[in-house]
Amino acid sequence: MTKSEKYAHFIEEFRLLIEGETDTTAILANTAAALREAFGFFWVGFYVVRPNDEGLDELVLGPFQGSVACYRIRKGRGVCGSAWERAESIVVPDVEEFPGHIACSSLSRSEIVVPAFDEAGTVRGVLDIDSDELCAFDEADREGLEQVCATLARIWN
Ligand code: SME
């Protein structure tokens, strides 16, 4: 099975998995678990847009699978904050080559971050996936994971 076929199959099952549920945290938690189970990712999870104590929106650590990670990321910072600011996916073949990359784990070598939009087209969080191998993510991952995030558009309330 090609990676694209694997994603197509995943999306079918994933739609059923989240059908009928409306709680954002619960759905994000099962999304991270399902992605980890299907693809064996090293770290997979969400950062969600939330106002901090000063009322400034930041990315805050949400449901994930993997080792402990940093809590907060400002807009434009790291891969996650850059994907949020640009409102587009970023594939990083080698994290050491990405200026400002935030290293939550020294084992992380490559990364993909996909923005999660609500139905109005606002970025409400990002899906972040790390690998302990270089060049682990490609266009098939970007397309598949963008579809996962598109499927989540209804859950942001
Ligand atoms: N590497 C990310 C930070 C989050 S961790 O990878 C879980 C970044 O540069 O934004």
Image: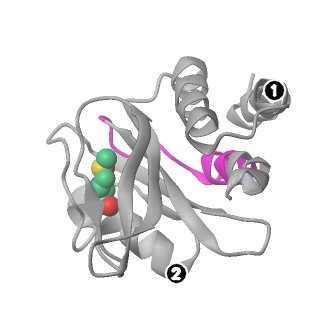
Q: In this view, does 95 lie to the left or right of 141?
A: left
Which residue shows up at 42% across the image and 46% down it? Answer: 62
Which residue shows up at 56% across the image and 25% down it? Answer: 39
Magenta stretch, residue numbers: 132-147
In depth, the one of 48 and 129 nearer the eye is: 48
**Is label 2 in a helix, a strand or a loop?**
helix
Q: Mark 1 points at which residue?
A: 9
Q: In this view, does 25 lie to the left or right of 102?
A: right
- Residue 77 occupies which quadrant of the picture? bottom left
Above/below status of 148 relative to 86: above
- Within 10 angstroms of label 1, few (less than 14), some, or many (20 or more) residues? few
Q: Position of residue 31 (x, y in %)?
A: 61, 33
Mark 2 or mark 1, which has the lower sequence index? 1
Q: Name the residue under label 2.
A: 86
Q: Where is residue 49 in the image (x, y as percent from the top left)?
A: 47, 66
How many numbered tags mark residues here?
A: 2
Ligand 1 quarter of the rendering: bottom left
- Residue 24 occupies which quadrant of the picture? top right
Q: Looking at numbered disc 2 in the image, what kind of residue is underneath it?
A: Arg
In depth, the one of 3 and 79 nearer the eye is: 79
**Is label 1 in a helix, a strand or a loop?**
helix
Above/below status of 36 relative to 63: above
- Within 10 angstroms of label 2, few (less than 14), some, or many (20 or more) residues? few
Magenta highlight on residue 139: yes
Which residue shows up at 43% across the image and 66% down it? Answer: 50
Q: Looking at numbered disc 1 in the image, what kind of residue is underneath it?
A: His
Q: Give the spatial CA distance, label 2 vs label 1.
A: 29 Å
Magenta highlight on residue 68: no
Which residue shows up at 41% across the image and 75% down it? Answer: 82
